[in-house]
Image: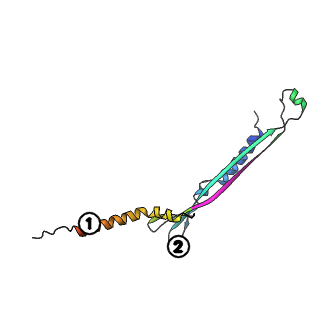
Amino acid sequence: MEDHPIQGLMKTAMESIKEMVDVNTIVGDAVETSDGSVIIPISRVSFGFAAGGSEFDGSEENQQSGGNENLPFGGGSGGGVSVQPVAFLVVGQGQVRLLPVDNNVLFDRLLDMAPQLANQFQGMLNKKQQTNNPTPNYNI
């Protein structure tokens, strides 16, 4: 059985989208700074695709013969891709930080700093307990 013309349209469009969207589009190439930190851009990729077509038959002869001959075909396809920067992943100086691009930076930074603040708070409580309850020295 011969391939239908719509298959060619869909194959071409899907191959084009496949070329445009790969893992390097989402997680970009790493860039090393002069202090040794590595910056990796992170993006959001959205894409859409549509295809359609129709066979046209205006001849009376084809309708009477049962429609067994090849009919003229008309069709089209389209697609779109949107790439939006989301954040930068910064690796260096013994830590990993996610720097978002949008306006909600304060909230994201508080979430990133929460474990560090909890550790510092725990350390302060431990020091205070040790100064309030000193261990006795039994040197004889």
Name which of mark 1 and mark 2 comes first in the sequence: 2
In the rendered structure, find residue 2 and report the number of the disc placed on it.
none
Image quadrant of residue 102?
Answer: bottom right
Magenta-colored stretch includes residue 82: yes
User: To which residue does mark 2 refer?
Assistant: 34
Residue located at (41% from left, 61% from top): 115
Residue located at (38% from left, 63% from top): 118
**Where residue 47 sits in the image (x, y, percent)?**
66, 51
Q: SS for tag 2?
A: loop
Judged left or right of residue 114, residue 28 is: right
Q: Check the image and name the residue furthest to the right.
A: 60
Gap between marks 1 and 2 measured at Cα = 44 Å
User: To which residue does mark 1 refer?
Assistant: 129
How many numbered marks have been drawn onto this rendered protein structure? 2
**Where residue 53 sits in the image (x, y, percent)?**
78, 41
Circle 1/circle 2 CB separation < 8 Å = no
Report the front residue among 31 and 43: 43
**Where residue 28 sits in the image (x, y, percent)?**
59, 60
Residue type beneath disc 1: Gln
Q: Which residues are magenta?
A: 75-86
Q: SS for tag 1?
A: helix
Q: Is residue 8 above or below residue 41?
A: above
Q: Would you call the spot at circle 2 few (<14 residues within 10 Å), some (14-19), or many (20 or more)?
A: few
Judged left or right of residue 14, residue 24 is: left
Report the front residue among 11 and 50: 50
Q: Check the image and name the residue furthest to the top.
A: 65
Residue type beneath disc 2: Ser
Q: Check the image and name the residue furthest to the left.
A: 140
